């Protein structure tokens, strides 16, 4: 009897485990986003209204690639909230591609010269792959140089200015005044004083980042809790240790607010600066081809700019979460 009861219990346990595995499998792999993928594939069989080549296979291969990545991430991502966020983003991409394909290649509702079908844009991306990589390298290089230089100057300076309440209050108003001036207006002076347009772009990014980071750092230092400073003084902590081991970690949240502001403004200003007089970079790529009426490449440039910004922002947010993990 005991053996029979144990066998029945084991069978029930196995059924329960199988049921849970089946439920987990359905939750991970049977989602609305996969239905949108099949809808995107099915509309490719509708007749094209455009007389020119729509390069539909490139759009199909892009969708298949995104779907493969989605399936891989569905297996790797453990947290349900993270998986939901990822699939929601992919679902938005599929929905956009469906609407874009229907409005261009299938029903020709938009002017073809201004709004090419998605397949043609993906084909152009593949065809211009080398040019795009060179321009990404140029833009990201300028961003990193100007941004990191601004951080290296603004954070230590903000720590020392913010440490003195009197100097910090005066410096706050000065930084607000100077930070309110758009850095792009300094481009004519930069062109007159600096040797290359690349150095002018680095200078503009430096100014775009410097003032918000300086303001954020001073604000963070001046708002550090008094009991934190008093506790450090009781332990006879030296000035250098106080500044970089106590004040800096306590100010990081405000510093990152300034860093985020500087990063956002930097991308906008860099693209604008590259459109004015650069000979390389993503802004130059967009401006150059839009002047010649090549809107397929213009859209490619816009998409690449968005992808680069998202990737850099993701890396920045990951670093921020790691450094602020003690606050969670």
Image (cartoon, grey):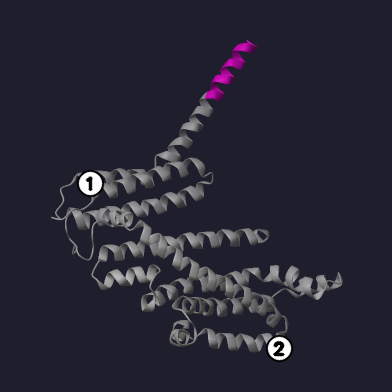
* Visible residue check, residue 265: yes
Residue 312: in magenta span? no
Tell me if mark 2 has few (under 14), some (14-19) or many (20+) residues whose alpha carbon lies within 10 angstroms of its own.
few
Say which element carries label 1: helix
Q: Quadrant of the N terminus?
A: top right
Magenta span includes 2 = yes
Q: Secondary structure at mark 2?
A: helix
Q: Is residue 68 above or below residue 156?
A: above
Query: Which residue is denoted by mark 2 in the rendering?
Result: 166
Q: Residue at x 66, y 61 (%)?
A: 327
Residue 78 lies in quadrant: top right
Q: Is residue 130 left or right of residue 208?
A: left
Q: Is residue 71 above or below residue 326?
A: above
- Within 10 Å of the Cα at label 1, are there few (<14), some (14-19), or many (20+) other Cα atoms? some
Q: Earlier in the sequence, mark 2 or mark 1?
A: 1
Distance from the alpha carbon under mark 2 to that under mark 1: 67 Å
Which image quadrant: the C terminus? Answer: bottom right
User: Which segment is the magenta one?
Assistant: 1-14
Magenta stretch: dominant secondary structure: helix
Q: Which residue is the site of mark 1?
A: 44
| For residue 32, above or below residue 205 | above
111 left or right of 124?
left
List x then y, in percent, for residue 294: 25, 66
Residue found at x 30% / y 66%: 298
Mark number for residue 155?
Answer: none
Q: Residue at x 60, y 73 (%)?
A: 151
């Amino acid at each position: 009897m005991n053996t029979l009861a144990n066998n029945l219990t084991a069978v029930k346990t196995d059924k329960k485990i199988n049921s849970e595995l089946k439920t987990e499998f359905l939750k991970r792999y049977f989602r609305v986003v996969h239905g949108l993928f099949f809808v995107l594939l099915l509309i490719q069989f509708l007749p094209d209204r455009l007389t020119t080549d729509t390069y539909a296979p490139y759009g199909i291969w892009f969708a298949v690639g995104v779907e493969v990545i989605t399936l891989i991430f569905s297996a790797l991502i453990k947290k349900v909230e993270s998986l939901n966020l990822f699939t929601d983003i992919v679902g938005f991409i599929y929905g956009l591609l469906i609407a874009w394909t229907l409005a261009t290649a299938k029903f020709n509702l938009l002017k073809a010269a201004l709004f090419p079908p998605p397949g043609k844009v993906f084909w152009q991306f593949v065809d211009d792959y080398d040019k795009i990589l060179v321009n990404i390298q140029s833009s990201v290089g300028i961003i990193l140089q100007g941004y990191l230089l601004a951080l290296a100057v603004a954070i230590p300076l903000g720590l020392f200015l913010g440490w003195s309440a009197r100097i910090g209050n005066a410096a706050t108003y000065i930084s607000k005044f100077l930070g309110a001036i758009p850095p792009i207006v300094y481009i004519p002076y930069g062109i007159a004083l600096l040797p290359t347009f690349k150095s002018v772009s680095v200078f503009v990014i430096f100014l775009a980042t410097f003032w918000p980071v300086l303001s954020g750092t001073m604000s963070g230092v001046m708002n550090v809790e008094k009991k934190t400073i008093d506790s450090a003084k009781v332990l006879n902590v030296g000035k250098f240790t106080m500044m970089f081991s106590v004040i800096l970690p306590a100010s990081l949240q405000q510093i990152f607010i300034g860093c985020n502001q500087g990063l956002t403004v930097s991308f906008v200003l860099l693209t604008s600066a590259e459109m004015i007089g650069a000979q390389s970079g993503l802004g130059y790529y967009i401006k150059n081809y839009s002047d010649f009426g090549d809107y397929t490449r213009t859209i490619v440039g816009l998409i690449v700019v968005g992808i680069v910004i998202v990737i850099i922002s993701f890396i920045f947010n990951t670093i921020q979460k790691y450094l602020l993990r003690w606050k969670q």
